[in-house]
Image: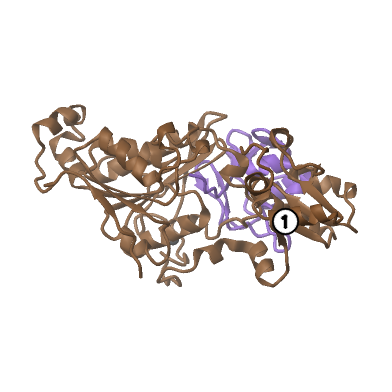
Chain colours: A purple, B brown
Amino acid sequence: MIRVVLPYHLRTLARVDGEVQLAVEGAPSLRSLLDALEERYPMLRGTIRDHGTLNRRPFLRYFACAEDLSLEPPDSLLPAAVTSGAEPFLIVGSIAGG
Amino acid sequence: MKQPAPDHTGPDAPSGRDLSTQEVARYSRHLVLPEVAMEGQKRLKAARVLLIGAGGLGSPLGLYLAAAGVGHLGIVDFDVVELSNLQRQVLHGTRDLGRKKTASASDRLRDMNPEIEITTYEAQVTSANALDLIRPYDIVIDGTDNFPTRYLVNDACVLLGKPNVYGSIFRFHGQVSVFSPPAGPCYRCLYPEPPPPESVPSCAEAGVLGVLPGVIGSLQATEAIKLILGKGDPLIGRLLLYDALEMQFREVKIHRDPHCPVCGESPSITKLIDYEEFCAGPAKARATAGMPAEITVEELKARLDRGDDVDILDVRNAEEWILCHIDGATLIPLTELPARFKELDAGREIVVHCKTGVRSAKAMTLLLGAGFRNVKVLRGGITAWAQKIDRTLSGY
Ligand SMILES: [Zn+2]
């Protein structure tokens, strides 16, 4: 199972607490993970990736194993530690409160 | 260009950088630390730090930086102390209600440490004054509470080459970093654009755990002191993520974007821009396109008194509805709205409101997308209604 940590405003929208666990077939890529996430939580469509272009929205970033995966091509495979569930896939959103 | 007049208080002759007997006693726990010692304490005394915002983050920042002996603290804020601030803004007290935050902060910090100089600027940071405000300082600390000011502070720091100790909070979550190009990325490298304003609620709308700014502001203060001392490993090129509910800190690497519009190889932002416009998003664009999308509380009251046929849709949460609501309104929390469109009559005029206007703007976008045509947002939300129309309602 792949563990995904959503930013707070999307946890509210998807009505989940804490991490989301997803099963992804085959060798999961950034794209297939996000597809699986949106399939399970259709209300997230358009919030992480742009509706039309499926590009990452510029106020969110993807991280895993302490590395920034935001600029990786969509078909790059996820790190093994994410695929095995040892490390979560983080979707981090810009916040501005102070 | 009008520069806000600074209010300056501090020792009359702050020239000598040697420590007085009083200061040696005051800073003795620092002086015995080899990483600080006399040299480090003198560096702190010589340092000039600008604190932008004297609210949630600014409270621990001001207290700890003053206590640590940062010799010159500048504080910028234009707000007054309100009751709802005191759940987290520990710099201010009940006796300060209604006072300017700069005045309250200055008094509290003078009491904390009369050895330091404090300069307050009772002003909003704007594109017109930011460079002049920041220029005299060595380090800037971003304790602001909105996206336009954060982009403004970032760009001004990049243009002037000042390190920006960044911290932000939302609900139970915090983020901290030190933006200091060329050693690491800037705020725009990390987040080139803010979220559309209607998509992310503010802390006033969504709440914030009172102790959260204490944690994040203290981390920022730690980073500022390390930068001054030149000791340790600063959070440059690293973003620290804090989740208070899970009680988890995560650290991720962040990198400079060679195409960054302000710190990249061929920057397009070479002077400060209009940050409200940059952060406004589609709702603003729609408003400026001439589509009347708002109604004031006075207009709504007059129309209801006339007997006009208007449906009022409240998109806050059930917990907020219990605190106060407008008579005759229908409650459908924003998160449930897409599943409950059919409960609304698209043929009727709908005035949608939330607490202050953020969620209602998002709701309007959803409603327009779902084919509702006659939708207006109540400007200022139920907060404005409670202040101007029905004073029996309790603000929250
Ligand atoms: Zn940059």
Furthest toward the front, the residue is B306
Q: Is residue B278 above or below residue A70?
A: below
Q: Residue at x 31, y 42 (%)?
A: B106
Q: Quadrant of residue B395?
A: top right
Quadrant housing the C terminus of chain B: top right
Q: Position of residue B18 (x, y in %)?
A: 9, 41
Q: Is residue A6 visible?
A: no
Using a 10 Å C-alpha cutoff, classify the residue at mark 1 as few (fewer than 14 neighbours), some (14 to 19) or many (20 or more).
Answer: many
Q: Residue at x 64, y 56 (%)?
A: A74
Taking depth in this image into account, of B396 and B366 the one nearest to the observer is: B396
Q: Is residue B156 visible?
A: yes
Three-letter amino acid code at disc 1?
A: Val
Left or right: B128 in relation to B204 = left
Residue named by callout 1:
B377
Q: Position of residue B35 (x, y in %)?
A: 21, 35
Quadrant housing the N terminus of chain B: bottom left
Taking depth in this image into account, of B234 and B317 the one nearest to the observer is: B317
Taking depth in this image into account, of B148 and B119 the one nearest to the observer is: B119
> In the structure shown, which secondary structural element does the residue marked by tag 1 occupy?
strand
Q: Position of residue B7 (x, y in %)?
A: 28, 52
Q: Residue at x 64, y 33 (%)?
A: A18
Q: Quadrant of ligand 1?
A: bottom left
Q: Position of residue B275 (x, y in %)?
A: 50, 64
